[in-house]
Image (cartoon, rainbow, N blue to C red):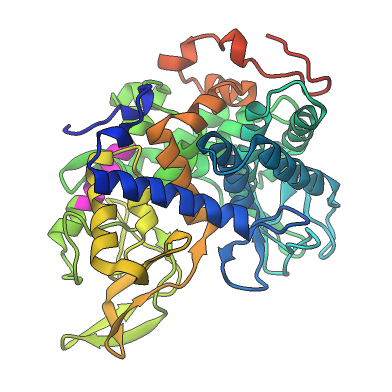
């Protein structure tokens, strides 16, 4: 495969080898995307909205997970001081730890260590009765919590408290409880309807949930759970757009887990059998999506080599509209994607689909981001980077549809994967975390960096005392 595949593992920032224009765009995009997290967070609670700059909406616990990770990136890039990042992180973790957990319909943040998908940003309690106790969003939150635990490793009172709180929050999650039947985790629970009765099966973002559940020192799932999960992959393995891969149509399913975990060169039993690791698989998925856009079987406007990217995102709305004499059905927020498993495409492009894949395939992502910025300008690029989505085929009053908001779960992959490509920061920090390493090892991953001991200079600090230990 052509291109710079392993740039993130080098000590030299790959941006230095880009053209001046490309380097300027990547640097600017990373800073603006960081600013979204830093400026949108509630100043008192630290909770981060699901979408912004909308007013009065819910906080998303997944946004918080990405935000807790963003603060480390901002520190290393010099956007904020370590003291500022420490204070923001500590405020957020203290607030999360202080919120009530019970099975009540109202007035709780969660139950059994899990958190409701959406919280009131000021009170930290369930936002509305339609908000479920979410296993995946809790895992995304805990990814940020564990990043903070390993990143803030200095011997001072505030950073020691961050480590202690992070340990408590993660250990509190009762993973086995989130099983309605069989070995698989359920997607969620509500006080009124109880378990959603939809299990995490098949390859998707569930990867990060199972790794955390296996790595738990307090409420672990059986090691056999991983094999039970990967056995459900079968129908997704195959060829799409000339690439043989483990398919998941929306690119977010490839991005979320790999925003925190570096799967390059490590394999589980499934990967060894199929002669691929998850990073290589995601790279294939990105190329397949680009090839789909180039083929453009539904003849959507502007699709091509540098205008592509389908994932879960906002849309112009549920509407049937005539476009060039042809009736077209457009969608609101939907899990758009293109793969062997399914195709859902209404001409809506999500910049995060490409941007959040930059570490997988920078040689095709950077030109795509540059072309989107050049062609569509300020309608899709504002003070917080790219808007969530746009649709050149959907036009009203002479203008194509463009979103006016960004979503935390779409901003997060852009920021984290850009930094992973540039320095490997998030991946390096998570390699220190004993719980992530334990989850990978119990899942049967071997090889690469996982075989190497944690360097003495990067061992985790004791969660209670702040003293270092091996």
Q: Nearer the viewer, residue 49 or 174?
A: 49
Say left or right for 25 vs 2: right
Please check the rendered image and state whether residue 286 is part of the magenta-colored stretch, yes or no.
yes
Q: Nearer the viewer, residue 145 or 280?
A: 145
Q: Position of residue 302 (x, y in %)?
A: 19, 68
Q: Position of residue 319 (x, y in %)?
A: 37, 84
Whether residue 447 is visible to the viewer of this picture, yes or no, is no
Above or below residue 144? Residue 132 is: below
Q: Position of residue 44 (x, y in %)?
A: 78, 56
Above or below residue 55? Residue 408 is: above
Task: Residue at 72%, 35% (x, y): give it.
Answer: 170
Q: Nearer the viewer, residue 126 or 54?
A: 54
What range is drawn magenta here?
282-290
| Quarter location, residue 279 | top left
| Quarter location, residue 265 | top left
Above or below residue 381? Residue 452 is: above
Please check the rendered image and state whether residue 177 is part of the magenta-colored stretch, yes or no.
no
Task: Residue at 28%, 68% (x, y): give it.
Answer: 376
Q: Position of residue 375 (x, y in %)?
A: 23, 66
């Amino acid at each position: 495969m052509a291109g710079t595949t392993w740039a993130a593992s080098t000590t030299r920032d790959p941006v230095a080898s880009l053209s001046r224009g490309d380097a300027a765009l990547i640097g600017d995009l990373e800073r603006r995307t960081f600013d979204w997290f830093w400026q949108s967070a509630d100043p008192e609670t630290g909770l981060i909205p699901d979408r912004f700059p909308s007013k009065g909406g819910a906080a998303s616990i997944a946004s918080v997970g990405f935000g807790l990770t963003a603060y480390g990136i901002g520190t290393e890039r010099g956007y904020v001081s370590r003291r500022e990042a420490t204070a923001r992180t500590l405020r957020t973790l203290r607030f999360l730890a202080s919120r009530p957990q019970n099975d009540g319909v109202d007035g709780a943040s969660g139950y059994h260590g899990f958190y409701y998908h959406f919280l009131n940003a000021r009170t930290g309690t369930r936002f509305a009765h339609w908000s479920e106790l979410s296993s995946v969003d809790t895992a995304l939150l805990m990814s940020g919590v564990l990043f903070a635990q390993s990143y803030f490793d200095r011997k001072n009172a505030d950073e020691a408290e961050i480590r202690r709180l992070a340990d408590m929050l993660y250990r509190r999650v009762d993973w086995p409880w989130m099983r309605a039947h069989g070995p698989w985790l359920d997607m969620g629970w509500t006080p009124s309807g109880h378990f959603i009765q939809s299990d995490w099966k098949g390859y998707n973002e569930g990867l990060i949930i199972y790794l955390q559940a296996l790595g738990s020192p307090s409420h672990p799932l059986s090691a056999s759970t991983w094999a039970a999960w990967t056995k459900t992959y079968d129908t997704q393995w195959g060829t799409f757009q000339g690439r043989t891969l483990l398919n998941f149509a929306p690119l977010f399913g490839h991005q979320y887990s790999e925003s925190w975990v570096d799967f390059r060169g490590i394999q589980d039993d499934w990967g060894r059998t199929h002669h691929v690791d998850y990073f290589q698989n995601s790279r294939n998925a990105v190329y397949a999506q680009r090839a789909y856009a180039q083929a453009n079987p539904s003849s959507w406007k502007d699709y091509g080599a540098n205008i592509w990217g389908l994932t879960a995102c906002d849309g112009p709305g549920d509407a049937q509209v005539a476009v060039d004499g042809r009736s077209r059905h457009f969608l609101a927020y939907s899990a758009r994607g293109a793969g062997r498993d399914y195709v859902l495409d209404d001409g809506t492009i999500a910049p995060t689909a490409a941007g959040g894949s930059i570490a997988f395939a920078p040689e095709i992502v950077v030109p795509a981001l540059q072309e989107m910025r050049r062609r569509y300008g300020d309608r899709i690029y504002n003070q917080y980077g790219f808007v969530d989505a746009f649709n050149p085929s959907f036009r009203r009053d002479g203008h194509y549809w463009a979103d006016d908001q960004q979503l935390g779960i779409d901003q997060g992959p852009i920021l984290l994967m850009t930094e992973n490509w540039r320095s490997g920061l998030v991946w390096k920090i998570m390699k220190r975390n004993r719980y992530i390493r334990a989850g990978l090892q119990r899942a049967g991953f071997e090889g690469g960096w996982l075989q190497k001991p944690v360097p003495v200079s990067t061992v985790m600090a004791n969660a209670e005392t702040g003293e270092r230990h091996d």
